[in-house]
Amino acid sequence: MHIRVIVTFAAAMLLLTACGGSALPEDVNEESQATTNASGSDSPAVGALPSGPSALDNMFSTEFPESLIDPGQIISGGPPPDGIPPIDNPVFLDVAANLELLPGSEPVVVLEINGDARAYPIRAMVWHEIVNDVVGGVAVAVTYCPLCNSAATYERTIDGVETTFGTSGRLFASALVMYDRATETLWTHYNGVAVIGVLAGVELVEHPSPLMAWDQFRSTYPTGKVLDWTATGFSRDYGRNPYTGYDDVANTPFLFRGALDDRAAAMQRVVGVERDGASGAFALEVVSGGAGRATSVSVGDADLVIFWLSGQSSALDVSTLDGGRDVGSVGVFVPRAGGRELTFSHDGERFVDNETGSVWLINGEAVEGELAGERLEQVPHLDTFWFAWSTYQPDTSLQSG
């Protein structure tokens, strides 16, 4: 193990506890969250989905379609499924009545579907990793992997059958491996693909869910909602970072197996984007600077713009989630609105398009000027580490300055 800051056995075990490497802690209220799986009496009906053996029980079953990754590369941390317990019955608070709920720089995962905007504080996600929710009428799984600092949201309806997702207690390339509770197929959180099990090859529908500072969320979505981490039914040290010092470019990813792409340091922060079969990674230093920056980029044949706004603290830096270094908040968009192509800049206070002078928020909404009320098409992206992005996107381009 080469992680410089996690040097004791106790600290390593703490890291595993938070990301699938330890049994359920004694203080978990087991009655507050029901865990269902294909072998239990509370299992959801499989319906139109194929039946077969559970990948949780045997990843090497010959009855599965061809696996997309080598099962031997998936590391078991030892816990049962949902040993890192997802939140299956999330409770939310109105932002307008809870403006001071969190320190302003503390990060949250942001999801907006059909006008329903919700914030999922990283102080909850770092301990639970998955929230099964319904947002804007769409059943989704909001996921976060602390070891690769990636937030990704997927629809949890597969071939017309709604299911929920849980943590498998396993890792692939130092990243969360999920399972669906309808068939117990294993899925990689990083790209929403079923990799081992009866559904191998299926890909979930993704929704953009960027990381954002709390004060940016509350000003951008004043009528939104925020997950109440005090109502999860579990006892955790919410607000503390169990990965102190992990966000260090000199570190080595924890429990990573395989070759590292040496085009950048493994723990280099990047903005990863996939568009129309092409993928690109942009080092944080390339797209950040000052109070804000708008950077025109290309991914394959697609022209995009990356908005970066200062003010979000790294959740994986120091012991408290609001005390980390400023890594800023990112949005990725198609630079087109009102029937025209746009270019953007940041004037030190706000994002402005150079064609009409309209003012834009970090979520791609115009709030002043000729284009007020327009929205840029938001492109899913990952704020993540280079080792993870390059593992899942080995053909990615990289812009590192």
Image (cartoon, rainbow, N blue to C red):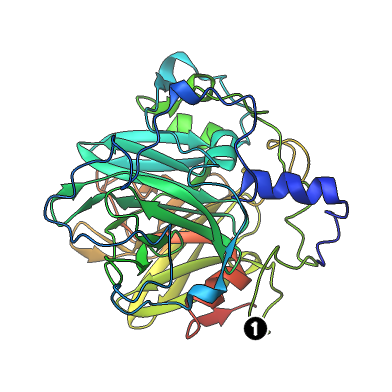
Task: Give the percent coordinates (x, y) of residue 279.
Answer: 42, 77
Q: Give the residue displayed 74% in from the left and 35% down from the top.
A: 320
Q: Give the residue displayed 72% in from the left and 56% down from the top.
A: 247
Where's the C terminus, which quadrant? Answer: bottom right
Residue type at tag 1: Ala
Near-viewer residue (227 or 162): 162
Judged left or right of residue 138, residue 329 is right
| Image: 383 above or below 350 | below
Task: Give the percent coordinates (x, y) of residue 72.
Answer: 54, 75
Question: Can you tell which quarter of the image residue 388 is in?
Answer: bottom right
Question: Can you tell which quarter of the image residue 172 is in?
Answer: bottom right
| Residue 203 shows in the view | yes
Q: Give the residue displayed 54% in from the left and 58% down from the top.
A: 170
Judged left or right of residue 50, residue 196 is right
Task: Give the percent coordinates (x, y) of residue 317.
Answer: 75, 48
Residue topped by disc 1: 259
Near-viewer residue (47 or 356): 47
Near-viewer residue (363 or 266): 266
| Image: 46 above or below 73 | above
